[in-house]
Amino acid sequence: MRVFLTATAVLFAMITRGNCLICEQCSNMNTKSCSGFFAPCPYEATHCVKGLENSTVGSNVRLFAYKGCVNPAKQATCGKEVIFRSSQMSLHITRECCDSDSCNSKNIKQAALRSSQTPNGFKCSDCSTDQSSNGCASVTELQCQGNENRCASFMGTASRPGDDVRRYTVLTCATKDACEVGISSMEGTHVYNFNLECSDPIIA
C-alpha cells in the first residue's frame, strides 16, 4: 500500500510539474541581454519576465539583464516605467512580462536606456551621495524630463549589481511607476534598511 501511495504521489508531482509555465532563465552583468536555459516555473507563476536595469553613479554604469519566472508578488511591476534620476545618480528599469511557454526568449527591449531627455516643466530637489544615509551636504534643483512627474527621496543602504553595500541619500526626479513599484521591481539592485518617499514636483 505504501509503495502504491508513493508511486501515485510521484506521478501526481510529474503531471503537476508538466503543467507549469516554461520560461527562459538567465542573468548577466554589464550587458544589455542574456541567454540561458528553459525550465518550468513554480506552479503559482503565471508569467515569464525579461528585464534590464541601468544603474549609474557618475560615469560608472552597471547594467543587469535578466530573464525568468515572475514571482506572483511582483506581477504588478510588469510593464512599468521605473526611473529615478538625479544629476549624479540614476536607476532605469524595464520589465516585460508574457504568459506563454518560452515567450521571454527574444531580446530584451532597451526602453530603460532610451528615456526621453526633453524637459517637462517640472523640477525636484537634487542631491546624491553613496557615503551617507543621513542627508546630503548640499541640495540643488533638477529639471525633470519625459514622464518624470514625481519627486522621490531615498535614504538607506543598497548595493548595485556587483557592488558592495553602501549608505545612500538621493533626491531625484522620478516616474509615478517608480514611486509605486520601484523597489519591488529591482532584480540586480538590492535595498535593505531604507525610507522612500514621493511628493508632487514643483512647476518650473
Image: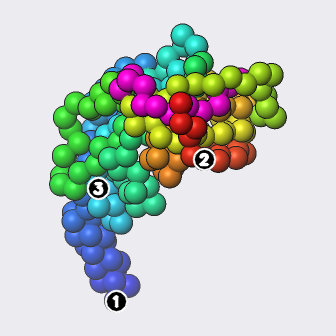
CB under 8 Å between discs 2 and 3: no
Tell us which disc is closer to us: 2 or 1: 2
Quadrant housing the N terminus:
bottom left
Q: Which residue is mark 2?
A: 199
Residue type at the position of mark 1: Met
Residue 107 position within the rendered picture, expressed as x and y whole percent measured from the top left: 22, 30
Q: Earlier in the sequence, mark 2 or mark 3?
A: 3
Q: Residues within 10 Å of mark 2 (few under 14, many from 20)?
A: some
Residue 174 position within the rendered picture, expressed as x and y whole percent measured from the top left: 51, 37
Q: Relative to 104, does residue 145 appear above or below in the rendering? A: above
Residue 94 position within the rendered picture, expressed as x and y whole percent measured from the top left: 37, 37
Residue type at the position of mark 3: His
Q: Earlier in the sequence, mark 2 or mark 1?
A: 1
Could you give the CA–CA distance between mark 2 and mark 1, rounded to whole angstroms?
64 Å
Tell us which disc is closer to us: 1 or 3: 3
Q: Secondary structure at mark 2?
A: strand
Residue 18 located left or right of residue 189: left
Q: Earlier in the sequence, mark 1 or mark 3?
A: 1
Q: Secondary structure at mark 1?
A: loop
Picture residue at 23% right of the left edge, 51% below the top: 98
Q: Nearer the viewer, residue 10 or 195?
A: 195
Residue type at the position of mark 2: Ser
Picture residue at 39% right of the left edge, 22% below the top: 117
Q: Which residue is mark 1?
A: 1
- Give the total number of marks visible in the rendering: 3
